[in-house]
Amino acid sequence: MRALVATAQTQGLRDNDFDYCVEGELVWIGLVCAKDEADPDGGCGCGRAFGGLNSHRATTTARVAEIEGFTHDDYVEALRSGLQQAGWPPNLAEELARELLVIAKHWPVGTVIERRIDQFQAREAE
Ligand SMILES: [Zn+2]
């Protein structure tokens, strides 16, 4: 199935890019704090970040990936355990999986996307 994963591709396109994730790990979209809610280029970074489900770190670039043999249930379970480890309510996993899939299905596999709070857009290929 299709899912969003962390990538270093296109890093540096924006001055305030960052990527502390592990390449290829699943990412989710976390909540945005008050500081970044007003400005995705705010000091915090959460307004433009995807969160790594394993590393619990963040990146400003995510890639639409096709993960062979990975099922919807696997995805929900990955989200559930990632949320739990990070101290978030794990029962958000189902809803989050749905939201992430809508985003992932929007672009062809291989597309690198970025986030502006709750807007997502493709980046130009390198
Ligand atoms: Zn923040």
Image (cartoon, helix red, strand yellow):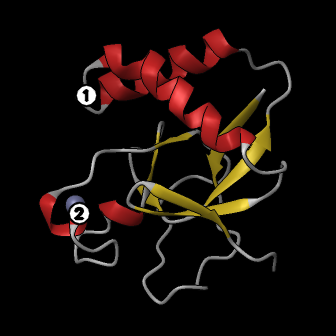
Residue drawn at point x = 61 percent, y = 77 percent: 11
Q: Find residue 101 and name its label.
A: none
Q: Earlier in the sequence, mark 2 or mark 1?
A: 2
Mark nearest the camera among 2 and 1 is 2
Callout 1 secondary element: loop
Residue drawn at point x = 35 percent, y = 44 percent: 30
**Up-down relation of residue 57 to residue 114 (above or below):** above
Query: Percent from the top left, x then y, of residue 28?
Result: 48, 40
- Front-most of residues 32 and 75: 32
- Taking the view exactly as shown, the residue that stands out farthest to the left is 34
Which residue is identified by label 1?
88
Dot 1, how many residues are within 10 Å of its Cα: few (below 14), some (14-19), or many (20+)? some
- Front-most of residues 31 and 20: 31
**Up-down relation of residue 71 to residue 104 (above or below):** above
Whole-number angstrom distance, CA of label 2 to CA of label 1: 19 Å
View quadrant of ligand 1:
bottom left
Residue drawn at point x = 77 percent, y = 59 percent: 111
Determine the image quadrant of residue 102. Answer: top right
The three-letter code of the residue at mark 1 reads Trp
Callout 2 secondary element: helix
The three-letter code of the residue at mark 2 reads Glu
Q: Find residue 37 and name its label.
A: 2
Residue drawn at point x = 41 percent, y = 54 percent: 118
Quadrant for the N terminus, please. top right
Query: Percent from the top left, x then y, of residue 72?
Result: 67, 15
